[in-house]
Image (cartoon, rainbow, N blue to C red):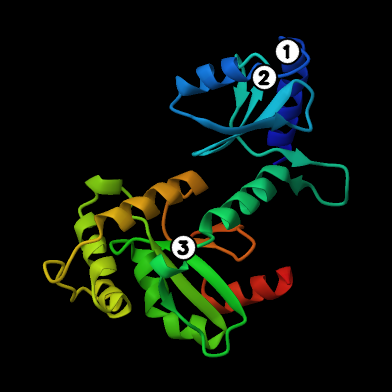
Amino acid sequence: MHFLGRTLLATAVAMTAFAASAKPDEAAITSKLSGLGLVPVTISASPLPGLNEVVTERGIVYVSDDGKYFLAGHLYQNDGAEPVNLTEQKMAKLNKDKLKGMEDEMIVYPAKNEKYVVTVFTDTTCGYCRKLHSEMQAYNDAGITIRYLAFPRGGERSRNFGEMSAIWGASDPAKAMNDAKNGTFNPNDGKKRDDLVRKHYELGVAMGVSGTPAMILEDGTMLPGYQPAPMLRKLLDSRT
């Protein structure tokens, strides 16, 4: 983290000298990023002179006013007792907003005495996803409701894309997910929901999911990887 902070600062100082104007050339920034397959959603000033925060459908990058230079990484504010990850904070807010209104598309395993809700991007062929699912009762007993979104890791080319499509199209998706995670689900039964699985996968990519399971907390913060129920509950309590 210290190395990254020094690198970002040094690069930002160097880039200030290259800034083409006092304000960003949004057309140039859009054009340059399009060559990388990135489409800006918003372009705004960052805390660093000469750099702009550009929110794209694949995350946040920091770009010079003329679009010729960019940084892909996390930006930290280091003027307190503990460095603050500004990029993570912004992504959490964006993630929270992206999940609004999607509740009806999720496969939900509710806690009887719910205290927290965690949304998980899952893949039925992922070993740690299966481990998490096998411990569902422990999460629920800890007061944690788990909500699933689909993330077949290879997108539509994934060998289990059809299986996940069938799970979301099943008359009882929660039971279908249970069967899939223990290897007894027949994906040839029932209808398919390719549209939802594709939508969830693209959403995960936009939120920065690179592997499964990926847990999204209620404030939008992402926790990559498996977290056992007691550890997750302790973390959630500490954040509260």
Q: In this view, does 53 lie above or below 238?
A: above
What is the CA distance from the residue labelled 1 to the residue labelled 3?
41 Å
Report helix, strand or loop for mark 1: loop
Task: Examine the rendering and report whether any part of residue 210 can be seen.
Answer: no
**Which quarter shows the N terminus?**
top right
Say above or below: 31 vs 110.
above
Between the residue at mark 3 and the residue at mark 2, the CA separation in whole angstroms equals 35 Å
Percent x, y for residue 134?
37, 79
Label located before the other in sequence (1 or 3): 1
Residue that mark 3 sits on: 102
* Residue furthest left as drawn: 188
Q: Position of residue 114 (x, y in %)?
A: 58, 84
Instruction: Please tell me which residue is depicted at 36% across the width and 56% down the height of the picture.
Output: 151
Query: Measuring 79% from the left and 23% from the top, which residue is drawn there?
Result: 49
Q: Find the distance from the CA under tag 1 to the CA under tag 2.
A: 6 Å
Q: Position of residue 69 (x, y in %)?
A: 62, 17
Query: In the drawing, does residue 140 fall left or right of residue 97?
Result: left
Crowding near the residue tagged with mark 3, few <14, some 14–19, many ≥20 C-alpha atoms within 10 Å = few
Q: Nearer the viewer, residue 170 or 116?
A: 170
Element class at badge 3: loop
